Image: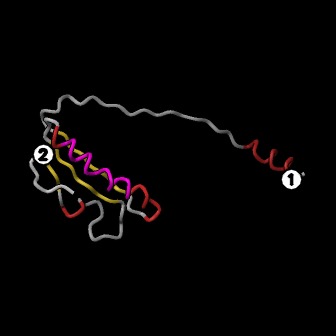
Amino acid sequence: MIWIWMAIGCVDYELSRRTMVDSYIQSSREAGVDILWVVDNSASMFEEQDHLALHTAHFTDYLTRVPVDFQLGVITTDLAVESPGRLVDDLVLTSVSERFW
């Protein structure tokens, strides 16, 4: 009897799957590349944060080996800080920076 009630209750909802694709054309890398990492620093994302920290050095090593000028900044989703949306430590890493993580 419960199964019949559950089956009838579900007919009001329709599910559909949509695929969305964002694309753009970058005219050239000669002018440089701006990279902004938005890190969700909520407690539920600790595994993803650990994964990001583990692989950040690989990413920055790659950036230093390719012939492109870049700027890399990091912000978080934390709204309980003095200035939400500001770069972490007001730090922008560039292709000529001496400090990487």
Please give left or right for residue 53 compared with residue 29 in the image: right
- Judge the density around disc 1: few (<14), some (14-19), many (≥20) Cα neighbours within 10 Å: few
Q: CA distance from mark 2 to mark 1?
A: 64 Å
Measuring from the top left, give residue 93's x and y in whole percent.
Answer: 16, 52
Q: Which residue is mark 1?
A: 2
Snapshot quadrant of residue 39: bottom left
Q: Which residue is mark 2?
A: 95
Segment tinted magenta in the rendering: 50-63
Snapshot quadrant of residue 28: top left
Given the image, on which type of amino acid does mark 1 rest? Answer: Ile
Please give left or right for residue 85 compared with residue 50 in the image: left
Pick out the residue farthest to the right.
1
Residue 23 inside the magenta-drawn segment: no
Q: Residue at x 12, y 45 (%)?
A: 95
Given the image, on which type of amino acid does mark 2 rest? Answer: Ser
- Which one is in front, 13 or 34? 34
The quarter of the picture where the C terminus appears is bottom left
